[in-house]
Image (cartoon, helix red, strand yellow):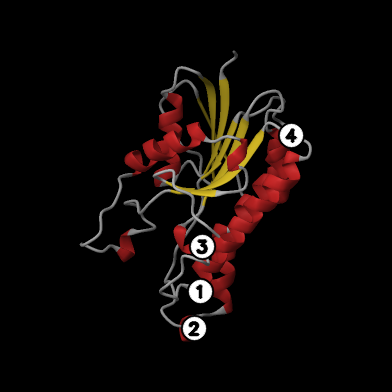
Amino acid sequence: MSKLNIAIFGSSGAIGYALCKKYTEQDNVEKVFCFSRKKTEINNKKACCFSLNYLDEEDLLTTSNKINFSFDIILISIGALLNPEKSIKDLTIEKFNNMISANTLPTLLIGKYFLPKLNKNRISKFASLSARVGSISDNFLGGWYSYRASKSALNMIIKNFAIEINRTNKNSIIFGLHPGTVTSKLSDPFKNNNKNYFSPETSANYLFNVIETKTNNDNGKIFDWNNQEILP
């Protein structure tokens, strides 16, 4: 079997960078295409790094059109968490729009231009990092309005992708991933000394193992780092 081609969006972030390094270390991987707003440097001959504006459709279209081969795995590790609301009184339109732009729209637009690049001749996978707090049934604390909503919307997009793309690509598996709480710029302002945090490398290892296990039965679902399904 020919080796795999991987695309990772958000390669300059803590988890994205760790995932890029993880996949370049695999013997069955041919190339890892690493996309970020600012070009990432990864010292491995398998890594091909590019800058890309995830919210610029012209940039996405131009980049997608340059690719004349299929991807076996497409991963999106993009997101932000800024000043989450403790109360509805803390919510602003600007904050809400910022969270949608950071956590929801990138996957929507990347999917629009790169889902057609998924390999149709063998099992291919498309996954985006979501969060447990995007689950409505798992919400017992409230708060964090804009972040929760942006991740819930992301989960719906993932489900829609899974339904639509499967009509034309029966080998596609599309799902969401919760990476656990990871030491990064995103989590640093909210650190709790009583909570365990993964290093980016540890989280990437867990996610790698989860991705490896996914089958067609998992299409449209969300899974945590421990491969447990997170219900909507």
Percent coordinates x, y for residue 94 in the rendering: 56, 75
User: At x 68% / y 50%, what residue is drawn?
Assistant: 109
Residue carrying label 2: 88
- Disc 3 to disc 2: CB gap under 8 Å: no
User: At x 68% / y 39%, what residue is drawn?
Assistant: 114
First in residue order: circle 3 vs circle 4: 3
How many neighbours does mark 4 have within 10 angstroms: few (below 14), some (14-19), or many (20 or more)? Answer: some
The three-letter amino acid code for the residue at tag 3 is: Ser
Residue farthest toward the front in the current orientation of the protein: 217
- Disc 1 to disc 4: CB gap under 8 Å: no
Residue 82 lies in quadrant: bottom left
Residue farthest toward the bottom in the current orientation of the protein: 89
Percent coordinates x, y for residue 36 in the rendering: 53, 43
Residue carrying label 1: 145
How many neighbours does mark 1 have within 10 angstroms: few (below 14), some (14-19), or many (20 or more)? Answer: some
160 sits to left or right of 32: right
Q: Nearer the viewer, mark 1 or mark 4?
A: 4
The three-letter amino acid code for the residue at tag 1 is: Tyr
- Disc 1 to disc 2: CB gap under 8 Å: yes
Residue carrying label 3: 135
The three-letter amino acid code for the residue at tag 2 is: Ile
| Label 1 to label 2: alpha-carbon separation | 7 Å
| Label 3 to label 1: alpha-carbon separation | 12 Å
Compared to residue 25, the image places residue 229 above or below, namely: below
Percent coordinates x, y for residue 7 in the rendering: 57, 34
How many neighbours does mark 2 have within 10 angstroms: few (below 14), some (14-19), or many (20 or more)? Answer: few
User: At x 71% / y 23%, what residue is drawn?
Assistant: 121
Q: Quadrant of the C terminus?
A: bottom right
First in residue order: circle 1 vs circle 2: 2
Residue carrying label 4: 169
